[in-house]
Image (cartoon, rainbow, N blue to C red):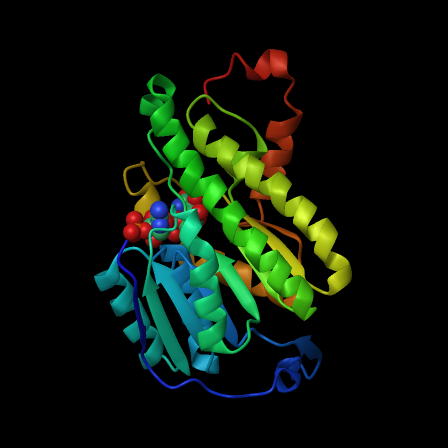
Amino acid sequence: MRRRRSQIDSLEERPIEARTERTGRSGRSKRAMPKTILVLGATSAIAQAWMRLLAPDGASFFLVARNAAHLDSVAKDLVTRGAAAVYVETSDLDETAAHTGLLERAVGALGTLDCALIAHGVLGDQAAGERDFAVAAGSLQTSFLSPVSLVTWLANYFGRQYHGSLVVISSVAGDRGRKSNYIYGSAKAGLNAFLGGVRNRLDREGVQVLTVRPGFVATPMTAHLPQGPLFATPDAVARDILHAIEHRRDVLYTPWFWRWIMALIRVIPEWKFKKMDL
Ligand SMILES: NC(=O)c1ccc[n+]([C@@H]2O[C@H](COP(=O)([O-])OP(=O)(O)OC[C@H]3O[C@@H](n4cnc5c(N)ncnc54)[C@H](OP(=O)(O)O)[C@@H]3O)[C@@H](O)[C@H]2O)c1
């Protein structure tokens, strides 16, 4: 693995206290938007859309992704949009042994951490994974074990700090196993259970743990699928994530109607569900 790190602009130094509250247009007091932000899987289309919402407020970012050229273009775009500072590091996040060093460098560069977004994941090849466990294990490494490793370190960091938002992009696919994508779905189901436990542990420390469960989103991950009316844009999902952070939500279905679609899917009895083509 080649490690690359650079600072795109100088870091804005501001005390945490100055960031705890802000007043919205309505005049009501709202929670502050995060100002020091770590993004794992920063080339994700959803992550990019979310960061574009925060850059104009002068946030500082530490971005991690495995494609250096793509990462640089994302960083430059954020600086253009008003980010106070953008640090980048290339890393294949499957390499969990490198996570501790990576996260320590991120905190060292930003000085503090208000929010971490874990966005990386792979849909994987379901048919190949059914034939070959090594393929399935690769998907589980990226979409389950890697986030679990990152969350383990970040939960301890935020817990000691008594402050912060830990945001992880899971999926509605984790709500019930289906024959078309149960390897991906099981990674996300495991992640949901893990995050539920971490939330239960960290709530009393003042830390938000937000599980994001999008339905279909039009991103490179789903570019091979026929796009139907249920597909959302990354921008719409990003706005929902930001709103959920601001309002200290625990679990976000996005767009909203997926909460009700999945509630219906979960109550279908197994004897009937197993005969359905899903
Ligand atoms: N799109 C949907 O319909 C949908 C629905 C529900 C949940 N989600 C979840 O949303 C999250 C973001 O996905 P997206 O929709 O924004 O798709 P995307 O644009 O394809 O983003 C996926 C990102 O994961 C990165 N990645 C994969 N393996 C990695 C690794 N080993 N190390 C570092 N980065 C790695 C990819 O990097 P490269 O560009 O280098 O491959 C890419 O930036 C994922 O967790 C996904 O499971 C997506």
Residue sitting at x 49%, y 40%? 144
Residue sitting at x 52%, y 38%? 188
- Could you say where residue 113 lies in the image, as x and y percent from the top left? 55, 71
Q: State the residue in front, 266 or 21.
A: 21
Lateral position of residue 162 relative to residue 91, left or right: right
Q: Is residue 110 above or below residue 176?
A: below
Count of numbered badges drawn on the protein: 0
Q: In this view, does 260 lie above or below 165?
A: above
Lateral position of residue 12 relative to residue 154, left or right: left
* The furthest residue to the left: 69
| Res 24 seen here | no
* The furthest residue to the right: 204
Residue sitting at x 38%, y 86%? 10
- Could you say where residue 244 lies in the image, as x and y percent from the top left? 61, 61
Lateral position of residue 183 relative to residue 252, left or right: left
- Could you say where residue 270 lies in the image, as x and y percent from the top left? 62, 16
Q: State the residue in front, 247 or 111.
A: 111
| Res 108 seen here | yes
Q: Is residue 82 above or below residue 206?
A: below
Residue sitting at x 53%, y 26%? 177
Where, by quadrant of the figure, is residue 257 drawn? top right
- Could you say where residue 31 lies in the image, as x and y percent from the top left? 66, 74
Q: State the residue in front, 62 or 219.
A: 62
